[in-house]
Image (tube, rainbow, N blue to C red):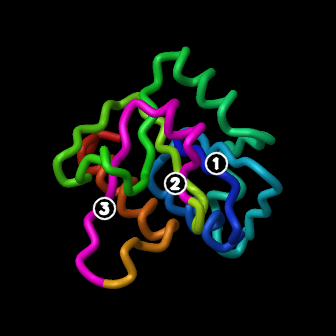
């Protein structure tokens, strides 16, 4: 499952929905006032369950109570290098805002945070690109689908 903080760009959100669909993600949780472009998201916009909420924290707390592991995609002092991180099957991947990242109130709910090493400038990948890379790594660890 993928849970997105409010996004600035509908293009990024639409690309995340498309990647989630390619990776057979069970659901995408979106917050704020999202608009998903069906031309970018393609089949993901129609076939993938999308759950819309005002605020992400109550949703994440609910999934945590259901036994999901909450893993954020963010650069923090305690982030795990994605190359050395073992996902669990029942994971909610939490994606931050393009500029603000994952806010402190959401970070405090997470079980782990992963980051993708960056070797040049700028210091981070685009949020949609980073999400695609992380979903691919999750699928690589669970190739049976």
For the residue labelled by badge 1, is the local secondary structure a helix, a strand or a loop?
loop
Q: Which residues are magenta?
A: 101-120
Q: Determine whether label 2 and label 1 are within 8 Å by CB.
A: yes
- Judging by the rendered image, the residue that carries numbered circle 3 is 116
**Residue 137 at what x, y percent from top left?**
29, 53
Q: Residues within 10 Å of mark 1 (few under 14, many from 20)?
A: some
Q: CA distance from mark 2 to mark 3?
A: 18 Å
Q: Is residue 94 magenta?
A: no
In primary-sequence order, the first of circles 2 and 1 is 2
Q: Residues within 10 Å of mark 2 (few under 14, many from 20)?
A: many
In primary-sequence order, the first of circles 1 and 3 is 1
**Residue 118 at what x, y percent from top left?**
28, 72
Q: CA distance from mark 1 to mark 3?
A: 26 Å
> Which numbered mark, 1 or 3, is in the foreground of this view?
3
Task: State the image quarter where residue 28 is shown.
Answer: top right
Who's the residue at 26% across and 45% down the image?
143
Of the pair 63 and 48, the residue shown nearer to us: 63
Who's the residue at 30% across and 37% down the image?
87
Does 83 appear above or below 94? below
Q: Is residue 105 magenta?
A: yes
Spot the residue most to the left.
Answer: 84
In primary-sequence order, the first of circles 2 and 3 is 2
Q: CA distance from mark 2 to mark 1?
A: 8 Å
Who's the residue at 55% across and 54% down the image?
96
For the residue labelled by badge 2, is the local secondary structure a helix, a strand or a loop?
helix
- Judging by the rendered image, the residue that carries numbered circle 2 is 20
Does 130 appear above or below 73? below
Number of the label disc, if any, that sits on residue 48: 1
Apparent side of residue 108 relative to residue 125 in the rendered image (left or right) = right
């Amino acid at each position: 499952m993928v849970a997105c903080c409010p996004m600035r760009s509908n293009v990024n959100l639409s690309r995340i929905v498309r990647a989630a669909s390619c990776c057979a993600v069970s659901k995408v949780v979106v917050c704020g006032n999202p608009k998903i472009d069906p031309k970018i998201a393609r089949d993901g916009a129609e076939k993938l369950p999308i759950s819309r909420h005002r605020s992400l924290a109550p949703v994440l707390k609910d999934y945590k109570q259901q036994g999901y592991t909450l893993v954020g995609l963010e650069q923090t002092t305690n982030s795990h290098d994605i190359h050395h991180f073992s996902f669990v099957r029942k994971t909610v991947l939490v994606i931050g805002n393009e500029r603000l990242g994952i806010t402190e109130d959401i970070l405090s709910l997470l079980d782990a945070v992963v980051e993708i090493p960056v070797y040049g400038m700028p210091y981070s990948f685009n949020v949609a690109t980073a999400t695609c890379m992380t979903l691919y790594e999750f699928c690589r660890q669970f190739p049976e689908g």
